[in-house]
Image (cartoon, rainbow, N blue to C red):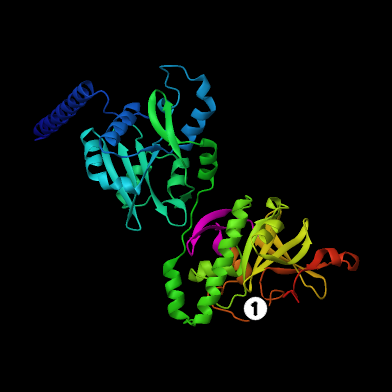
Amino acid sequence: MILCGHRIKYKQILLIGFIVCISLCILTLYFFLFPTRHFQPYLDVEDVQLLLRAAEANGVSVVLFDPLILHAWSSNEEVVKSGSCLFLCHVVGPLLFSITEKDLKNKGHFLSMLAQQGFTVTQFYADDKESHIFLRRYGPGLVISILYWSNAGYWRQYQLTGPPHHMAMVKQFITHETWGVLNMDRAYERFETNEAVIDEFKLTAPSNIEDFDEDYKNAKFIPCNETQATYFYTKYKEQDNPEVKRFQHLAWKTLAKSKTVLDKIGIPFWLSSGTLLGFFRQCNIIPWAVDVDLGIFIDDYSSEVIPSFEAAGMKLVHKFGQLDDSFELSFKESDIKVDLFFFYTEGGIMWNGGTQVKTGKKFKYVFPRFTLCWTEFLGLKVRIPCQTLDYIEANYGKNWFIPVKNWDWKSSPPNVQENGEWNENERDKVIVLVNEKSQND
């Protein structure tokens, strides 16, 4: 019996050994016959050639959209030697391209041809719109972002999102930096393109790479939360009458004109205070607001601000503070005022100031540090704090969702602090009222 048991184990070992041997032979033969089927850590430039061939055959305009490659190429274009491959051959992670939504009409034939050329084609959707196409053969692959034109005057790129198995697959090949770019909605200014010969490939690229690079760095986009706005209007019924609509329309015109003025002189601004709350909470202008509120970093101030607003027909109402402390400007047109609050940075906080006219008291509104993102608000492309909720909660507290119609700018905000007062002998310079009495009583 013992001898029989040993024979059975011996046969099992022989069988396992035979299976392993056959498997190794098959793998060896496979890699011998198909030596390029293993993963390559760097981009296979043939992928680019195949993409361009399929794009040309199907009338698809593919634009190189990779800021690292574009920057490296534009900075070293004069040292490139004929026949060398200095840029595309050293891409780690997928190479980025873009197409526009109009190219999707030829998508079927385009993707079919790519699949026939050996690409695995994975499509991603966000908000019912196709957002990205991931193409891969043996290397890290290619990512095509699909750009959608907005009537607000910018190109919209949607976040890369999809089923878990698709996301897990694509994350294997995307670098941390690239994932940080693709894992968000983005907005780009309109840009021109021209031909760029990179590593002897004739590619289409943005004409002004320096401007494109700067735009790309600051392209994060946060859409208005329509679901939250719908819930707000369901929970808090608001008046819908001609007077409210008239105010909101005039406030919108004031915001639009302010944007035109500030954009023209190159001063970045963002929605602040009640205007930001209206955007964040209800995707609209708050009906009982009395003005439009915008924030500007003091380092971005220009002496062109006042004459530019006045040239646009917006009269200066008041000027408070001085450039190094609590600076604030207000302009008015059609009974709607726009307040420009200038922000200062101190360590881990940012703040803007306020001044009470009759007492000369100074107030300070403190916010956690923030960066700026793009959004679309009532058909206008404008900036908002990326950390919008933190900003709102600093200014309005945890109960910001509940409408408050009686608001005292000196005591209601949770982030307000008394900040001394202006000296009597300087008040005529730091409290300047123009045309009419200020509301900062």
- Report if residue 328 is visible in the image: yes
The residue depicted at 43 percent of the width and 26 percent of the height is 198
| Quadrant into which the C terminus falls | bottom right
Residue 374 is covered by the magenta coloring: yes
Total numbered labels: 1
Using the image as rendered, state which of residue 304 and residue 45 is in the foreground. Answer: 304
| Disc 1: which residue | 407
Label 1 Cα crowd, 10 Å radius (few <14 / some 14-19 / many 20+): few
- 190 up-or-down from 417: above or below: above
* Residue 214: image location, x then y, percent: 55, 42
Query: Which residue is outermost to the right?
Result: 425
Quadrant in the picture for residue 341? bottom right
Is 289 displayed left or right of 226 in the figure?
right
- Report if residue 42 is visible in the image: no
**Which region shows up in magenta?**
368-390
* Residue 360: image location, x then y, percent: 82, 71
The residue depicted at 62 percent of the width and 62 percent of the height is 294
Residue 371 is covered by the magenta coloring: yes
* Residue 171: image location, x then y, percent: 38, 43
- 243 up-or-down from 159: above or below: below
The residue depicted at 55 percent of the width and 66 percent of the height is 253
